[in-house]
Amino acid sequence: MRYPKDGRFGEFGGKYIPETLVPAIEELEENYLKFKNEKNFKKELDYYLKQYAGRPTPLYYANNLSEKIGGAKIYLKREDLLHGGAHKINNTLGQALLAKKMKKKRIIAETGAGQHGVATAMACAVLGMNSEVYMGYKDTIRQKLNVFRMNLLGSKVHPVKSGSKTLKDAINEAIRDWITNVETTYYLLGSAVGPHPYPVMVRDFQSVIGEEIKSQMKKVNNKTPDSVIACVGGGSNAIGTFYPLVDTNAEIIGVEAAGHGLKTKLHSATLSAGSKGVLHGMMTYLLQNEEGQITETHSISAGLDYPGVGPEHAYLKDTKRVKYHSATDTEVIDAFLLLTRTEGIIPALESAHAIAEAVKVARKGKKSESIVVTLSGRGDKDVEEVQNYLNKNVKN
Amino acid sequence: MSRINEKFSELNSKNQKALIAYIMVGFPNEKATMSTVRGLIKGGVDIIELGFPFSDPLADGPVIQNASTVSLERGTKIEKFFSIVKKIRKQTDIPLVLMTYTNILYHKGYSKFITDAKKAGIDGFILPDMSIEESKEYLKAAKDITDTIFLISPNASNTRITRIAKTSSGFLYLVAVYGTTGVKTRIKNYTIKAIKQIKKQIKGTIPLGVGFGVSTPEDVKKYIKAGADAVIVGSAFLKLIEKTPESQIESKIASFTKLLKKQTIQK
Ligand SMILES: Cc1ncc(COP(=O)(O)O)c(C=O)c1O
């Protein structure tokens, strides 16, 4: 499934889009195909990834954590050390550079936690472009520091007050803006979702994560990891981690947000509990009611609070190549505290979902086995959320 | 011949163009919907588009977004919707077109949904997020049952115009402006040019409707003069419903419809 020409991963994906966007999507696909293998484009992107974003990121052996659990060895792929504090910059540099080659003057983006918005604002600032970011009104409150950060970086933030006022509504509003300003505007989508070619393009820009893991593990013990784990919101850090490893023997696990539990309605575990449908230009798994209306989601991490998921994950689930598990808010907080205290690394709450799963897998594993967990982001943005949670749920 | 085709040939023989009204069913409630429909019919509307609300109407502007939210909050469900369509069908023979988003049909199964809709009295579908590329299953399910009306944009290439025209039945729906529904702007030159180009290419094989942002008798007149076979007015009706006391909806809608319809009658 290198480059699915019809934009389909099995039955998933496609381009279910308003007609006005068709020429824009065609233009995007044409340019992406032209530039992705062009020497100068690759060189320039590589330069920014290395010198600006801080690639390659370390593959850190979490000795204290592994010893404490007493099972398999846990390695952390440190995307949290990237400029901006999350994997998002891999994608925004790639797409912003592409937009620049396409001579687009105006960039729009959506954001959930604010991480993609910040990464977009950074990429646009360094490449000299204007950006505007749509963000659910609820998220602008949950993540108000990120709003300010985007403003500082020169980006205009539009709070979205329609629908559930979270990420899905921010995407709706960004698409509406794109329909309206289709001739001047580039839509810089932040996850491996949306109409073709976005899921493929975002995967390709994020695949640097999995490629590095592969060569770094080779250096460590001359083999591929036994297990690979990443959290899944829209699925960009996960597909970037998984894609280069799907042809190996590694066990691959994506971790969704189980919120208050899969038996409640308060979760965002699309693959674990959803059904097939069409949203935001793609066919994929969705959280929806019996009438096909999209339902509201919940997660302690704003970045996983989305009722859909990238179509390639839907395909990897149905073909059983990847397992999709989930972690509840409580498990996530425990994992957050555990990593913080054992390793002195404060993970993003999104990434803490992957840590929670890694702990379970490591416990069952042997010392000779190795698990790689993608630590998609750092948790500075979440300390207030965690403080609130701990105050409410007096534990410790 | 479908009810929509029949309507267009009937209008043709009377030297008229079609006035198509879009309303959101269940906005603000069932009773208001029935009054609106009566008003539209009294005013001489030719085709009615009945909106079924979707939680994420990404091609719609604030007016229809709000109408969708209200309708959903008031409990509009598929079965309820079809029962309202049946009531409308009992009162009139004019073509009824269902406008909603792809997921609503996909979730029920295209075939099941389309058959049920037809039974209730629906003659055609408009799905603003259904592109011709993804339409195979949908077209198969609708074949010989209902018309499938596709949208076309002013930025469509000539090859695309031809492909969309071939895929559509009933009529073609030209989106007048780059943007979502209900955004009011001056009539653009690019729209007039698109109308002329599309008409030239389709050579009378299918009627051409123009919608999005059409809100006044003056707009209707200009698009028809440019060559449109139909105009679609939506958000303007919803705004009128919003500000009219329920007891007057029927009469207010009827008089506004009359004003619009007048512009489609050629001397
Ligand atoms: C740190 C971090 N991890 C993960 C995600 C989830 O996105 P994705 O599933 O596309 O990687 C986000 C989204 O905001 C994030 O900020």
Image: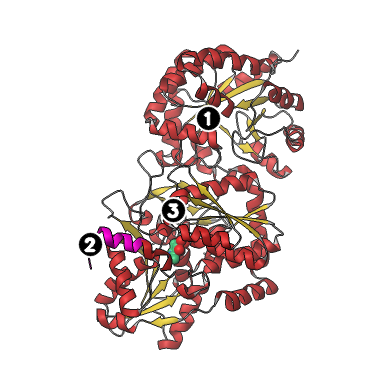
For residue A141, the mark is 3
Disc 3 residue type (three-letter) = Ile
Q: Chain of mark 3?
A: A
Q: Chain of mark 1?
A: B
Asked whether the viewer can see residue A325, the reply is no
- The secondary structure type at the circle numbered 3 is helix
Which residue is at 36% across, 42% downward? A289
Residue B83 relative to residue B185: left or right: left
Magenta segment main secondary structure: helix
Which residue is at 35% across, 40% downward? A290
Residue B33 relative to residue B181: left or right: left
For residue B144, the mark is 1
Badge 1 and badge 3 both on one subunit = no
For residue A394, the mark is 2
State which region is magenta: A385-396
Asked whether the viewer can see residue B75, the reply is yes
- The secondary structure type at the circle numbered 1 is loop
| Ligand 1 lies under 8 Å from the Cβ of mark 1 | no
Do callouts 3 and 2 mark residues in contact (Cβ within 8 Å)? no
Q: Position of residue A136 (x, y in %)?
A: 47, 50
Q: Does label 3 or label 2 sit earlier along the sequence?
A: 3
Do callouts 1 and 3 mark residues in contact (Cβ within 8 Å)? no
Whether A252 is drawn above or below B58: the answer is below
Whether B255 is drawn above or below B75: the answer is above
Disc 2 residue type (three-letter) = Val
Query: Does the magenta portion include B160?
Result: no
In the picture, the quarter occupied by the C terminus of chain B is: top right
Disc 1 residue type (three-letter) = Asp
Badge 3 and badge 2 both on one subunit = yes
